[in-house]
Amino acid sequence: MSVTQTSAPVVPFDEAMSRYEPVMGLEVHVELSTATKMFCGCATDFGAEPNTQTCPVCLGLPGALPVVNATAVESAIRIGLALNCQIAEWCRFARKNYFYPDMPKNFQTSQYDEPIAFNGYMDVELPALDGEGVETYRVEIERAHMEEDTGKSTHVGGATGRIHGADYSVVDYNRAGIPLIEIVTKPITGAGSRAPEVARAYVSALRDLLRALDVTHGRMEQGNIRCDANVSLMPVGSDTFGTRTETKNVNSLRSVERAVRYEITRHAAVLDAGEKIFQETRHWHEDTGITTAGRPKSDADDYRYFPEPDLVPVAPSREDVERLRATLPENPAVRRRRLQEEWGFTDLEMRDVINAQAVDVIEETVAAGASPAAARKWWSGELARRANAQGVAVTELGVTPAHIAELDSLVTGGRLNDSMARQVLDGVLAGEGGPTEVADARGLELVQDDGALQAAVDKVIAANEGVVEKIRGGKVQAVGALIGQVMKEMRGQADAARARDLILSTLGVEG
């Protein structure tokens, strides 16, 4: 039996990779964004007061009978189709039995040997190691099956937030019964040292796909998407899988990569010492970057599955499946490649856009009239910086694609420079109105009087003989120092490009 650890011996990752080949299996639990739960009519609103979204069915009271949520079934089929799966013509639910402290009926209604979707795949991309293009890894999907979520236990007191050392525990059953789709991969082999990156890329690509399908809110920090990462090692040259461990409920992309990497280094240390890996669940600790032992990992036989007697089988017609296939959106990866080509972005620029989660808003901003370059500059630059500082997504800042398109038109139309545009953006974010309204209220407009600008240029030139000599001597880049002083003289209300032209023409220097 495993023992809870606060730390464990590890070996350097590269050293582990020199002797072992990692094998992964990823189980991603997707909380569907249906209005009601999987088998009852209770609401699924996040953040409601504890135990206010419950009923006899999701509380497992005697005599209560479940009814399948039709929208959840359709979402499951659409997910399966998007993952290139076969859709079952007939499948049914089963009872999965073991002690659930946060599932009041003490079993989970799930699917066992008859999932609704099976035998699919997803291609994921990583930047090529040589920096040119991408490398594609195919992750094969074993199954995608329907089930229900458990409630949420909170352990009060103690230092870890877990049951060991806690003073007492409380349970919120609001989440019990929310529809889940569990997507299980086949064993992922051949990734070598890129296995942790592949794990992250797969979960990231899956999240993008699920968001495009509009079947989940996709907020990992709220538990809408949770990943269980199974890891084992086999000696290089062997084809016999090692004993796996399962790191449970990893809820960020960064943590998926870190947890897989850590388990590889921990497994390698155990095997190097001539010891055996325990088949167990593991807890991921974000603060320390390690896993610790949970409970011995059960096999399917231990769950005593048997068909759910209170639910009829699910038998989607082929006509319904094809109707749902017609609702699938463009694959996010295909769409990104199409947009990158249309916008003329480099791989690095597109990567910045993706990292800022700004693909959609840039597309909408371009549709509203902005240039792709300007839309990218604002959304993956200034706005991404502000969003990161506030810990929110760019779409939650309160500025719209129409705002950015309008702001861009004020810059390209010659009314504002970039510095002024940032001031206008401050006003928009502060709720002062749209860009033009803010610019009018704050009196922001470039000085169009060349006479006033020329006077400022003459004054700056007269005060900087040393810089002037450098420019006349061929160091034209030194003009930047004078431009800054001209802008200061004009209180920021001058066009920097026009100021540069006037400085150089005044000095008789070619730009």
Image (cartoon, grey):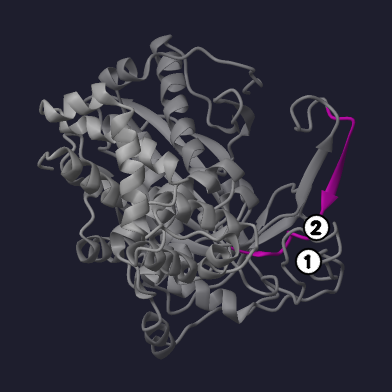
Magenta range:
166-180
Amino acid type of the residue that numbered disc 2 sits on in the rendered structure: Tyr
Amino acid type of the residue that numbered disc 1 sits on in the rendered structure: Cys
Expressed as whole percent of the image width and height from the top left, the position of residue 313 reads 57, 78
Q: Nearer the viewer, residue 192 or 435?
A: 435
Which residue in the protein does label 2 denote? Answer: 173
175 within the magenta span: yes
Which residue in the protein does label 1 denote? Answer: 58
Q: Residue at x 18, y 24 (%)?
A: 469
Residue 240 located left or right of residue 94 = left
Q: Nearer the viewer, mark 2 or mark 1?
A: 2
Expressed as whole percent of the image width and height from the top left, the position of residue 44 reads 72, 67
Find the residue positioned furthest to the right.
167
Q: Is residue 68 above or below residue 21?
A: below
Find the residue positioned furthest to the bottom.
319
Q: Residue at x 26, y 18 (%)?
A: 18
Q: Give how far apart the Cα atoms at labels 2 and 1 are.
A: 8 Å
Q: Residue at x 52, y 37 (%)?
A: 246
Residue 312 located left or right of residue 198 = right
Q: Nearer the viewer, residue 395 or 185?
A: 395
332 within the magenta span: no
Q: Nearer the viewer, residue 27 or 1?
A: 27
- Whether residue 470 is visible here, answered yes or no, is yes
Residue 427 located left or right of residue 48 = left
CB within 8 Å, label 2 to label 1: yes
